[in-house]
Each structure stands twice: as structure tokens, then as C-alpha cells.
Image (tube, rainbow, N blue to C red):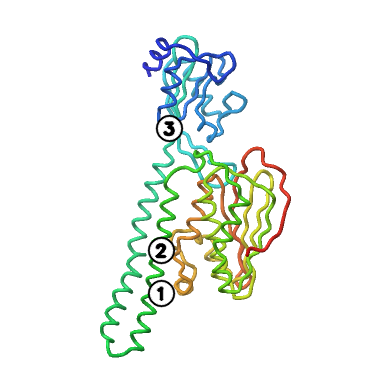
Amino acid sequence: MAWLNRVKREAPEVAGQASGTTLPASLVDLLASIDAESLLLASGDAIIYSTPGIATFQLTRDRFLINNSLMNLVRAVRRSGEQQEATMELPRGPIGEGMHDLLVRVTPIGDDGMIAILIFDDSEMRRLDAIRRDFVANISHELKTPIGALSILSEAVLGAADDPEAITRFANRMQAEAQRLTGLVQEIIDLSRLQDGDPLKSGEVVDLVLAVKEAADQTTLSAESRKISVVLSVPDQVEIAGSREQVIMAVHNLIENAINYSPEGTRVAVALRVQDGIAEISVSDQGIGIPESSLERIFERFYRVDAARSRATGGTGLGLSIVKHVATNHGGDVSVWSVEGAGSTFTMRFPLSPNNPQPTLKAVEAK
């Protein structure tokens, strides 16, 4: 880290983030260009510079560190005068199982007590490695099934050249398998999109009310074909930080799933509410329910409660896995309540963005 000292000595100074503080212009530019989040502390441990992504980790408050592990590293650097390095795990949000895997380097700069903290987030790399291993193992089997069925059915069509009824029957089955393969490929694409980046680092504000309404609109044709009414209960405005596209994808999957596993003429209720700084989206149906033995596995990739029913509805076993990935990526979680024969309720929870207005509940029916 000698280059930090050199830049600080040789560069002209500019105003820093803290009032009355000046920092070398080259130092600020250099920290901003590194593929890491960074903090600069003055001699009294007040923060005089930070990159925008630091807020993602919830390490600071009122220009001071609040994480005990990081504060201990800073104290060790001040005692020894030498760079310290450590790995840390931080939750992605106040709820859920998602974690940030961080590599932290703390180093002294110059002789006036300034300290630089560089934070490298390894979460994405580790997550991608785990997903890649599981995905390759599972997808080869899942793709073999519809492709093998299409191959067998095409041979059957060739062998039934003189039987128009058999050709029609085989052709219909081929069409169903082709649609299933198309759905599987689309959900593979959706799952891959979740790996494109960290939604908490994008800084995008997501209006959950609009996201839920758009997701419900996307299921209109499915609901009408089964004579199912989709009823929404939503506040005026609820905002979270993250990816609007991912949230819509997850809510759409939950509503579509509820429609597919509900009897005709029933109702699917979608509610958005706020409680204790957490936004909750629940999707309830009057469907067949889920056996208690399957509840713990329902969010696993490619898991199906009823394989025959999944084939009939076009289910791939990826939809609920996508929902869980979206919730975890946003520092939230997803849970399910279900009783066989009585229906199911899936609930996603997301931490709110700051300064959310107090919501007013409205009930509407999705058209």
C-alpha cells in the first residue's frame, strides 16, 4: 500500500466528504477507480471519504464505523502501524439468509493518523461458482427428458405414416413437449439473469406497488383461461432498493404458480403490506395445497411435488427457485404456508428503502 502514501504526499488537495476536510485529488480518483468499496478515516476515526457502495454493507452511521469486527481491525492497525487483512461475513439485509462474503484490508496512510479501508466483495464469485456447479449437474438431466421424448415421438410419427389419427396424437404430444422445452429454456434464461449482478449495488429504487400490478397483468391470459380471479390489495406506495425486473419476475412466478395449481372458478389473492420496516408480498390460492413432507424442499431447483401435475401444467421446477434467489439477492426471504386441499400462501419479504411514505391500503381486482 506504499502507493497510497505516495499519492497522498504528491497530489494536490481537494475538498473531501467531511466538512473542512481536504484530500488529494489523485487519491480520491484512485480509490474511485479500484474494484472495491473504500473508506478513509481521520485520526479520530471519523469517516472523511467513502464510496457510494459502502452503504450496501451497513457498516457506518453518522460518519463513524458501527461494525465491531471492522473497528477491531482499525485498532490493530493503529497499534501496529501495519496493514491488517481479514475476511468477514455480513447479512445482506435484516431478514433472510443472504450473506456478503468480504475481504477487508485496512492500512495506515502517512504520519497523520489517516487510515484506508478497502472492501472486496467475494459474494458474487462464490455464489456463481456454487450455482454453476449445481446448475450443470441438474440441467443436463432436465434437458434430456423433453429432448428424448421429442426424438421418440418423431420416430413414432415416421412409423405411423398410414395412420392419420396416430400422427395427430403424436404431433400433439410433440407440441406439448416442445412447449415444455421452451418453458424450461426461458426459466434457465431467467435464472441466469439473476447472476448478472448484485441488485443491492445497482441503487435502483423499486416501486413495489407498480411491480406487483405489472406482474399480475402478465398473468391475465392464464387466469382468464381457467376462470380464476386475481385480486390485489396494495398500498399507495412502497419502495425497496434492488432490481425491478427481478421483483416482477418473482411475483409473476408466484401468481402463475397459484393459477396453475388452483381449480377453475377460484380466486388468487395478492396482498402487499408493510410491517416493522419490511415489505411483505403474499400470494394465496384455493388450490390443491402442498404435502407437509415437501414444504422444506419446495424452493429447491428442479424439485416438483407432483411430477405428473407439473408436466400437465408445463411446470419446470425452476419457478420457486427463482423466487427464492430474488428474495435472497434483495436481502429478504420467502416462506410458504400450505394445507393439502385448502390451498397455499407464499410470502416474500423485502427490507424497505429509507423514507417510505405511510401506506394506505387499496383493494382492486386484476383485469
Q: Residue at x 53, y 66 (%)?
A: 293
**Callout 2 secondary element:** helix
Q: Is residue 341 above or below residue 319?
A: below
Q: Residue at x 42, y 42 (%)?
A: 124
Structural distance between the alpha carbons of marks 2 and 3? 35 Å
Expressed as whole percent of the image width and height from the top left, the position of residue 275 reads 69, 48
Residue of label 3: 120
Q: Is residue 78 above or below residue 171?
A: above
Expressed as whole percent of the image width and height from the top left, the position of residue 327 reads 54, 50
Amino acid carrying label 3: it is Phe
The mark that comes first in sequence, 2 or 1, is 1
| Closer to the camera in the image, 47 or 28 | 28
| Quarter containing the C terminus | bottom right
Structural distance between the alpha carbons of marks 2 and 1? 12 Å
| Quarter containing the N terminus | top left
Could you say which quadrant of the image residue 277 lies in? Answer: top right
Disc number placed over residue 68 in the picture, else none: none
**Mark in front: 1 vs 3:** 1
Residue of label 2: 184
Answer few, some or many: residues within 10 Å of disc 1's Cα (few below 14, many 20 plus, some between 14 and 19).
some
Structural distance between the alpha carbons of marks 1 and 3? 47 Å
